[in-house]
Amino acid sequence: MAAPASSYDVLLVGGGLVGLATAWRAARRGLRVAVVDPAPASAAAASHAAAGMLAPISEVTYTEEPLLRLGLASLERWPAFAAELAADSGHDLDYRTDGTLEVAFGSDDLAALDELAGFMEKLGLPVERLTGRECRRLEPMLAPAVRGGLLAPGDAWVDPRRVTRALLAALERRGVTMVPARAAGLERSGEAVVGVRLAPAGEAPGGGTPSGTTGGGTPSGTPSGDASDGISPGGTTDGGSPGEAPSGRVLFAERVILAAGAWSGAARWLPPEVLPPVRPVKGQIMRLRSPEPVLRHCVRGMVHGSYVYLVPRGDGELVLGATQEELGFDTRVTAGGLWELLRDARELVPGVTELEVADVVAGLRPGTPDNLPLIGPTVLPGLSLATGHHRGGVLLTPITTALLMNEAGDDEGLAALCSPLRFQEQR
């Protein structure tokens, strides 16, 4: 007997980059897959505001070696991931592998960068120390005041918005069901999770998530962020007539995966024992436009002790980012945040002030207490998590899908690093 239309092998709650990518990998294995989100890949998703740096080497910190290990494993998977997604979708991802140039503005910045270089070399990471003149030879638009830098040739970057559009196209080709609704609860059989209950059409999201947000990971005020807005992009729509969201019922699945980003920790419809310790961390970015690319490398600079990055796109766009603010679910773009970005970017590349402003946006990163993501099974059979990626959501997407689909191969130990069970003892 054929399975009912509302029964799936894998059900994703959350249609951001990680959720869509996991759905795509599962569909490639021939599984029946659905994604529950009132507005998949909307402007509220963290990936919409991400620069797309795939830079575990240049972003290494002294206390996060486990995160470095995870990032390197995911970076190694990005070439195959990008090639397969481009082939499946027919989309260009603007995936680039020219490396990251990390530069220092002042003498104190250079001293800190030299100390970091020693730490990188101790870890065996491939980096090259450069003088200020050598930095400007690689990037002529750098300011004369740049004192020196490091080149991490193994780093890469990609355009997350293009990746998201490619995933939606690939999901449509694979026949993945897109469910434009909010999750409102888990369906259980004994201890096991066997599905998700959808919020009735028109119900305010407050019953399942904090005020102003939705269970699928988007603010309720976001355009097209309400289930009544109808069919979402990509795939097929489960149930109802065109324009009617299939809310107020249960979708059954062998496996439910929560991938709601910063909203994962505020899903009050989850039992307390599996509610992830995830908090929103605000980040503001600017997108500038130039007729020709301004930079060839991704430039990450330290200016008076603060970091700013400039990420070039092949079409001439330049992304400046990003602030890091602990302000809850606040997604306002502020004059102060943009001023800080432009102030520091101008010290490194004075010409940025002549570029056209194409976009400004604030996103919410899903942070965890130890800055490691939550990937894998919970204490409830049938329920897994894929959230808490903080700044590394784009970088960690391939390893996240590999861990969830049991395709991590020889990378033993990574699953334990990311296991949601590591926080159980603290409850």
Image (cartoon, rainbow, N blue to C red):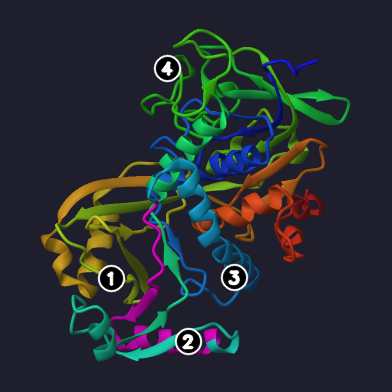
Percent x, y for residue 40? 48, 32
Q: Which residue is mark 3?
A: 68
SS of the residue at dot 3?
Answer: helix
Dot placed on the residue nearer the N-terminal end, 3 or 1: 3
User: Is residue 335 visible in this depiction of the protein?
Assistant: yes
Q: Which residues are magenta?
A: 93-120
Label 1 Cα crowd, 10 Å radius (few <14 / some 14-19 / many 20+) = some
Dot placed on the residue nearer the N-terminal end, 3 or 2: 3
SS of the residue at dot 1?
Answer: loop
Percent x, y for residue 159? 38, 53
In this view, the residue farthest toward the left is: 354
Mark-to-mark CA distance, 1 and 4: 41 Å
Q: Which residue is mark 4?
A: 229
- Relative to residue 314, is residue 213 drawn left or right? right
Question: What's under tag 3, amino acid-wise?
Answer: Leu
Mark-to-mark CA distance, 3 and 2: 15 Å
Dot placed on the residue nearer the N-terminal end, 1 or 4: 4
Q: Is residue 2 above or below residue 309?
A: above
Quarter of the rendering occupied by the N terminus: top right
Question: Within the image, what quadrant is residue 331 found in?
Answer: top left
Q: Which residue is mark 2?
A: 117
Q: Which residue is mark 1?
A: 296
- Relative to residue 86, is residue 347 drawn left or right? left
- Relative to residue 153, is residue 171 drawn left or right? right
